[in-house]
Image (cartoon, rainbow, N blue to C red):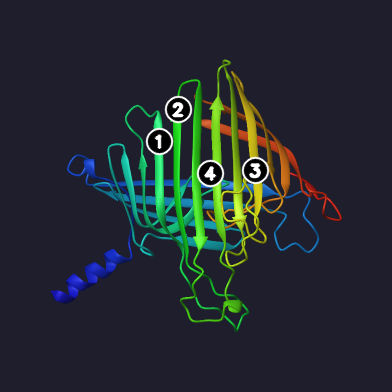
Amino acid sequence: MNRIFVFCLLSLACMQIPGQDLSLIGKSEPLQIAGSAGLQYYWRPCRQSGSPYPSAGTIWQVGLTASLYGWNLPFSATYSNASVRWQQPFNRFSLQPSWKWIRIYLGDASMNFSPYSLNGHQFTGAGTELEPAGGKWKISVMGGRLLRQTFPDTLHGLPGVRQRMGYGLAGEYHQEKFSLGAGIFYASDEKNNRVQAPDSLLESPAENLVFHFRGTVGFIENLQVQYEYAVSFFTPDRRGPELKPDILYPLEFRNGSARYNAFKTGATYTTRIGSIGLSAERVDPGYKTLGAYYHLNDFANYTFLYAGAALQKKLTWSVSSGCQYDNLARQKRSTSRRLL
């Protein structure tokens, strides 16, 4: 009996349990199963010679979610050009209970504030999303460890990682004709060395502060305009000497400290035959945020989008095309241009 009890505890400790609505216990169906399937096809007309990426291919995605009184167990599989990726819910601990308009994140979780700020980076800690009745307000708060400190891998020449902590707050307000949103995200690496390894074998302790602003405007019938702006203050090494303070830089100004901007805007017009949209995006060279695993920078793009539907919206399709170029600061020898 004791062995069974210990086994149950170990199973729970490595389980991801997303989206538990406590108000559904005893009211919803005991067991529910839902699934989804999708197919994507991509084509790169300007594939560079020697590129490891194929010029064309397909991506198959299959998902299955079993729900027991609101406790969800998601499974998914992805197939892409002879590579298979399988995901199941028993690889980490995550508890996400919800009650009415309150959702809480505990353990390993991820949240999204903005593509230029906190964008899906997993953290170990706590967070909450509040969406009061009426749907006009949404408030998100998070705090926790973004990266665990690791030893350097001298065999493969990989530096050690310092412990990184992150904190964020975001809010949105929605009305019928417009919406407004703003947020702040801060992350920093510890200066202290916990793994007792030379500092030269560890990554430099970075510091980052990001503000983002977003919204939509729809005062003209069938026309909606979206915008989003973010500014990132990034210091690559917190150990550097502090320089003369910059009134436009809210962190301690050190060697390498810089301010980066990102901006995206677009307009969508809806007609009887579908939706037509135009968008533009610009991200400064060197733009960084510690709230994302990877972020493209030094580019500008312009995109056209058309989306339509038929058979009472049971069949939908969309087509997009555009162009993108880099070398915004004119510091590279050449400028790359490609079709989207």
Residue sitting farthest toward the left: 1
Q: In this view, does 334 lie above or below 133?
A: below
Residue 11 at least partly seen: yes
Residue 313 at least partly seen: no
Front-most of residues 316 and 247: 247
Mark 3 nearby-residue class (10 Å; few <14, some 14–19, many ≥20) = many
Amino acid on which the number 4 mark rests in the picture: Ser
**Which mark sits nearer the N-terminus, 1 or 3?**
1
Front-most of residues 5 and 183: 183
For the residues labelled 2 and 4, the Cα–Cα distance comes to 16 Å
| Residue that mark 2 sits on | 174
| Residue that mark 1 sits on | 138
Estimate the x, y position of residue 287 in percent, counting from the top left. 65, 51
**Which mark sits nearer the N-terminus, 2 or 3?**
2
Q: In which quarter of the image is residue 294?
A: bottom right
Amino acid on which the number 2 mark rests in the picture: His
Rendered image: mark on residue 262: 3
For the residues labelled 4 and 1, the Cα–Cα distance comes to 14 Å
Estimate the x, y position of residue 333 in percent, counting from the top left. 86, 56
